[in-house]
Image: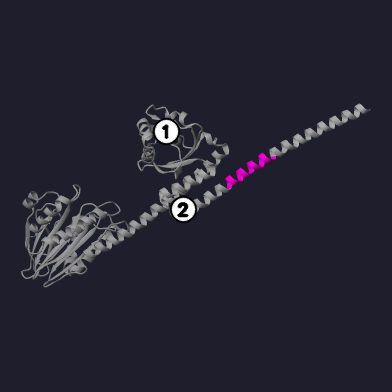
């Protein structure tokens, strides 16, 4: 009986010990689960904070470097990395350039032996190399990540196949998480965070969180670029409108009052900035300069060259009663500063109100049209000449000549740029010289203003609703 009691007590004790051990084991499991839960909860909270800060940053339209810093430092904190970096693809797409490398980030690219040796004497040499080096898109772990096209976990960077080059070595004991940054099917760059082996390995959960954060970062960077490009485009549009306003001021604000004549001009730019211009210059008593010009090309370069040509002609025209000699002086002045692929066609005339004579010179420009009221016919005024900016001076001055026209009451002269002749209809047929001449012939008896109005009306009817392809400038001269 005693033995039975003893055995029962022993069994009970063993059961109690087993229960105690089970409870202790359970408590350890609970602590581990609670620790893991707390870690996950902390990681989730850090992720939430990162996304919140990222959203605030985008609203403030940060610079690429600032946004890169927010992303790298934020993800470093989320996955407890020791550092990280963002490399952006170059515009040509052949290199990756560092945008931001965190302070404690280990090297993420191969280091040439000479840099390593130099860094032994001066640690700044390594830092400078890392921050200035661009990486070919097909080299190193960064290039490998781009080629794979998805997030990767490199557990031991130094043993990665991309670092087998004897001249570009890697010796640090580092693991890394990398992800390509893509937006709208375009490679933006690579995001990478690293951890030294002494700090432990990245867990599968770390990798999952990193991959999710990288996707959000790609979206943020892509949208930031869109916002920045839109802002830059708006700024450029404002600048162009301001430039257009300056250019408008350079054009005549009103038609000149010339005894015995009516003169009317207009400029219709195809873009915000025009490469055409016309001008009136008061030369002397009853003598007036009339210029029309067309700069090759369009946009800002043409507009700048137009302004230079205008100011140069205005400086040489007074006191020079030969249009060809005045343009020769302009040509010599601007030739050294004009691009090889640009030139200026110009017609410059001097109108003598006292004699009723018009002296014209044509520098590679469209021939002027002359309407004779007596015959009702239109003539082409084809004085010889070379465009400005093609020759330094000797050839220009040899071939460019003046042409004198005596105007009688009712006679009209039309100056125009090639945007009139080359205007296209829906079938891509040009307006052409025949239509210009006929429109001019019909409108000329009605006077200078009517010529411009009729020419614009016919051009609009001919081209239809399509966009204007080139600048259009017209100047009409009527002898009363």
Residue 33, image quadrant: top right
Residue 8, image quadrant: top right
Residue 184 on image: x %, y %:
44, 45
Q: Are marks 2 and 1 in contact (CB under 8 Å)?
A: no
User: In this image, 215 relative to 168: left or right?
Assistant: right
- Which residue has dot 2 on it? 58
Residue 98 on image: x %, y %:
40, 42
User: In this image, 120 relative to 212: left or right?
Assistant: left
Q: Which sits in the foreground, 288 or 193?
A: 193
Give the distance between the C-alpha atoms of the residues marked 2 and 1, in whole angstroms: 31 Å
Q: Which mark is residue 155?
A: none
Location of the C terminus (image quadrant): bottom left
Q: Is residue 32 magenta?
A: yes
User: In this image, 475 relative to 468: left or right?
Assistant: left
Asked whether residue 431 appears in the rendered view, the answer is no
Q: Which sits in the foreground, 222 or 295?
A: 222
Q: Which sits in the foreground, 33 or 480?
A: 33
Residue 168 on image: x %, y %:
38, 30
Location of the N terminus (image quadrant): top right
Question: Which of disc 1 and disc 2 is earlier in sequence?
Answer: 2
Element assignment for label 1:
helix
**Magenta-drawn segment:** 30-44
Q: Is residue 226 above or below residue 162?
A: below
Q: Is residue 91 magenta?
A: no
Among all residues in the image, which is located at the extreme right? Answer: 1
Q: Which mark is residue 140?
A: 1
Q: Which sits in the foreground, 1 or 386?
A: 1
């Amino acid at each position: 009986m005693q033995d039975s009691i003893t055995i029962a007590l022993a069994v009970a004790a063993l059961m109690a010990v087993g229960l105690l051990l089970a409870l202790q084991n359970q408590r350890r499991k609970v602590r581990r689960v609670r620790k893991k839960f707390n870690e996950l909860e902390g990681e989730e909270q850090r992720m939430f904070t990162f996304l919140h800060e990222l959203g605030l940053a985008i609203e403030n339209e940060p610079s690429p470097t600032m946004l890169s810093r927010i992303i790298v430092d934020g993800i470093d904190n989320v996955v407890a990395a020791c550092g990280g970096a963002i490399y952006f693809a170059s515009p040509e797409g052949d290199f990756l350039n560092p945008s931001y490398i965190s302070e404690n980030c280990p090297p993420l690219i191969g280091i040439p032996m000479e840099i390593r040796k130099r860094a032994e004497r001066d640690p700044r040499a390594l830092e400078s190399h890392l921050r200035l080096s661009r990486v070919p898109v097909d080299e190193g772990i960064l290039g490998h990540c781009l080629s794979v096209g998805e997030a990767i976990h490199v557990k031991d960077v130094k043993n990665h196949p991309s670092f087998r080059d004897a001249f570009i070595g890697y010796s640090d004991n580092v693991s890394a998480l990398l992800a390509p940054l893509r937006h709208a099917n375009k490679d933006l760059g690579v995001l990478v965070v690293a951890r030294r082996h002494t700090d432990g390995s990245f867990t599968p959960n770390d990798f999952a969180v990193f991959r999710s954060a990288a996707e959000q970062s790609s979206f943020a960077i892509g949208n930031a670029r869109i916002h920045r490009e839109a802002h830059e485009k708006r700024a450029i549009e404002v600048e162009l409108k301001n430039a257009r306003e300056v250019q408008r001021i350079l054009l005549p604000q009103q038609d000149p009052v010339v005894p015995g004549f009516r003169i009317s001009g207009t400029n219709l730019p195809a873009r915000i900035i025009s490469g055409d211009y016309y001008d009136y210059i008061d030369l002397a008593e009853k003598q007036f300069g009339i210029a029309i010009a067309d700069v090759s090309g369009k946009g800002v370069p043409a507009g700048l060259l137009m302004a230079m040509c205008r100011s140069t002609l205005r400086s040489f025209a007074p006191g020079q009663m030969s249009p060809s000699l005045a343009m020769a002086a302009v040509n010599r002045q601007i030739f050294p500063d004009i691009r090889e692929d640009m030139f200026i066609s110009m017609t410059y005339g001097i109108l003598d109100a006292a004699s009723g004579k018009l002296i014209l010179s044509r520098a590679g420009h469209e021939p002027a049209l002359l309407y004779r009221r007596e015959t009702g016919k239109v003539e082409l005024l084809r004085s010889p000449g070379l465009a400005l900016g093609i020759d330094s001076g000797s050839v220009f001055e040899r071939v460019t000549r003046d042409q004198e026209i005596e105007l009688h009451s009712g006679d009209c002269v039309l100056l125009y740029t090639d945007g009139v002749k080359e205007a296209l209809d829906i079938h891509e047929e040009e307006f052409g010289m025949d239509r210009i001449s006929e429109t001019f012939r019909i409108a000329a008896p009605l006077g200078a203003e009517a010529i411009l109005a009729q020419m614009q009306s016919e051009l609009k009817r001919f081209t239809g609703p399509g966009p204007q392809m080139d600048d259009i400038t017209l100047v009409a001269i009527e002898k009363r």
